[in-house]
Amino acid sequence: MSFVIDYLLIPMYLMLPAYVANMAPVVFSKTLKFMAIPVDGGIKFQNKDIFGKNKTVRGLVLGTLAGLLIAYFQFILQKNDILTSITILNYSNFLSIGFLLGFGALLGDLIESFFKRRLNIAPGEKFIPFDQLDFVLGSLLLLSIHYVPSLEIIIAIILVSFFGHIIINRLGYILKIKKNKW
C-alpha cells in the first residue's frame, strides 16, 4: 500500500489543480464563446501563429480558475484523516498553490504550442512526449516558487502524468469530448 500512496496518490493529489486546469479548456470549449479569443491575438511570429487559434483567453482564464478552485477544495479537506496521508503541502496558501499549478499547467501548454508552430506541427497533431508533459513541467516550474518536491515525487509525477494523460485523452476521444486521441 505504501508504494501506491507514495508513487501514485501523493503525486496525483499534489498535481490535481494542474490536472484539472489542463482539462478545463477542453471541458469548457463549447461555453462562453465571447472569451474564445486567441491568446496570441492572431499575431504571427516568423509568418507562423505564435500559439494558434486553439489557445484561447477562455481556456487560460477558466483553466487557472479551475486550478484555484481545486486548491481551495484541498485546503478545506486538508484536515480529513484519509487525505492527510497523501497531502505533502499545507494548503493554507491555496491561492498561491492553485495559481502556480493551474496557470503553470497552461503556461507549459502554451510554450509547447509555440514550439509546435515553429516545427510546423499542426494544432491537435501529436508531439510525444511533450503533449503529455508540457503542462506538468510548466506547473512544476511555477510551483517551485513555493515548494520543490523531492526527485522521487517529480519522477513519479512525470510517469503518472504521462500514462494518465494518454488514458484520459483516449477516454475523452471515445466520449467525443476531444477531437483527437492525443
Image: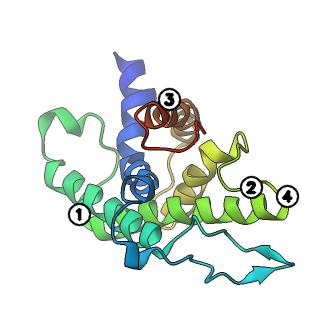
Which is more N-terminal, label 2 or label 1?
1
Amino acid at dot 3? Ile
Question: Which residue does the numbered mark 3 point to in the structure image?
Answer: 167
Q: CA distance from mark 2 to mark 4?
A: 9 Å
Which is more N-terminal, label 1 or label 3?
1
Amino acid at dot 2? Ala
Question: Which residue does the numbered mark 2 point to in the structure image?
Answer: 122
Q: What percent of the width, then of the height, locates residue 30?
A: 38, 60
* Element type where label 3 sits in the image: helix
Q: Total number of numbered labels?
A: 4
Q: What percent of the width, then of the height, locates residue 180?
A: 58, 41
Query: Height in image: 48 above or below 8?
Result: below
Q: Which mark is residue 92?
A: 1
Q: CA distance from mark 3 to mark 4?
A: 26 Å
Q: What percent of the width, then of the height, locates residue 152?
A: 55, 35
Q: Are marks 3 and 2 in contact (CB under 8 Å)?
A: no
Q: Residue at x 42, y 19 (%)?
A: 3
Tell me if mark 2 has few (under 14), some (14-19) or many (20+) residues whose alpha carbon lies within 10 angstroms of its own. Answer: few
Amino acid at dot 4? Leu
Which is more N-terminal, label 2 or label 3?
2
Tell me if mark 1 has few (under 14), some (14-19) or many (20+) residues whose alpha carbon lies within 10 angstroms of its own. Answer: some
Question: Which residue does the numbered mark 4 point to in the structure image?
Answer: 119
* Image-quadrant location for residue 107: bottom right
Amino acid at dot 1? Ser
